[in-house]
Image: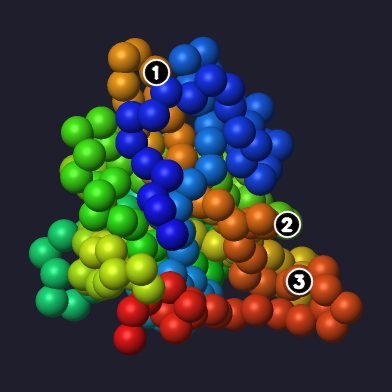
Amino acid sequence: MKAAVLLLVVASAVACGRKNAESSSLAGEVNQRGYDVTVLQAWLGEHTQVKINQFVTSKYDLDPNNCVTLRDQLSDTLHDGRKYWYVTKQCDAELERVAKLPGFDQVSPLLNSTRFDYDRVEGGDNYTKTGLCEMVEYRTVTRDAALHAPTFKGLGFYLSSGNSGDGNLIMFVDKARLHAVGKVLLTDGAPATVHRFISRGMCFGTGGNGGSIANRRYDFRPFARYEDGGNTYNVWDHVPTDFRLGRTTDAGYTFVKTFDRQSELLKP
């Protein structure tokens, strides 16, 4: 396969799979398909939460003191006279820190915002509203020819969380924040780099969402971004449909927790 990268002048935008991604283009921004980046692996991972009591633990417990306070609003008084507050914490940097891979100093970029709501009660007994949140792990593989291009700016994703709360997002990560976790050879012999990304998935609150949990899904597609002559070029993964984790729409209506394309994409 030949890499469809770099500084080629594009006369018109090429469809990039999702209408959401196409319609998001700004003036001077061109979408096209190519072979610069694709998804190597993805899976539904561990859980995360703001640690506000001792009763529930997760793999990635977040310290609320390390999060940004977006709301701390006095709400009401309990029957025993104690006051309580509605609290919202944004924990993006804290989650990146806690979810760092062992053996690496660099954190992996978080692709969406992570907010947690809870009730802070006078004298303790804090109660979560957001609950445990599922983590999604991604590994992309990008041709080194693309990464080393002078016009290369970084990698991004189209994300659609279905019924998981975030809707449709297009997220971009500057090349300075990319977390390389491996070097590989593609099947055509071209050298490439594996990068790790994470995102917060569905949050499992205190009941009432059993059907949503069973049918949750995450659609995604990566792109490489270049800038040249005042224009921005997004080279989207060439795959015909977006990648999906979670509930499928095929005849078996299966639930996909993980996939691995190493045998398809990498040289043995």
Q: Is residue 12 above or below residue 226?
A: above
- State left or right for residue 264 relative to residue 13: left
Report the Cα–Cα distance between label 3 and label 2: 13 Å
Q: Is residue 132 above or below residue 237?
A: below
Q: Residues within 10 Å of mark 2 (few under 14, many from 20)?
A: some
Closer mark to the observer between disc 2 and disc 1: 1
Q: Nearer the viewer, residue 11 or 94?
A: 11
Q: Nearer the viewer, residue 139 or 103?
A: 139
The residue sitting at 33% across, 79% down in the picture is 267
Is residue 168 in sight in this rendering?
yes
Q: Residues within 10 Å of mark 1 (few under 14, many from 20)?
A: some
* Residue beneath disc 2: 163
Q: Is residue 178 above or below residue 234?
A: below
Q: Residues within 10 Å of mark 3 (few under 14, many from 20)?
A: some
Quadrant of the rendering where the N terminus is positioned: bottom left
- State left or right for residue 169 relative to residue 100: right
The disc, 3 or 2, on the residue closer to the chain's N-terminal end is 2
Residue reaching furthest bottom?
268
The disc, 2 or 1, on the residue closer to the chain's N-terminal end is 2
* Residue beneath disc 1: 231
User: SS at mark 2?
Assistant: loop
* Residue beneath disc 3: 248
Residue reaching furthest right?
251
The residue sitting at 19% across, 33% down in the picture is 150
Q: Which disc, if any, is residue 168? A: none
Report the Cα–Cα distance between label 3 and label 1: 37 Å
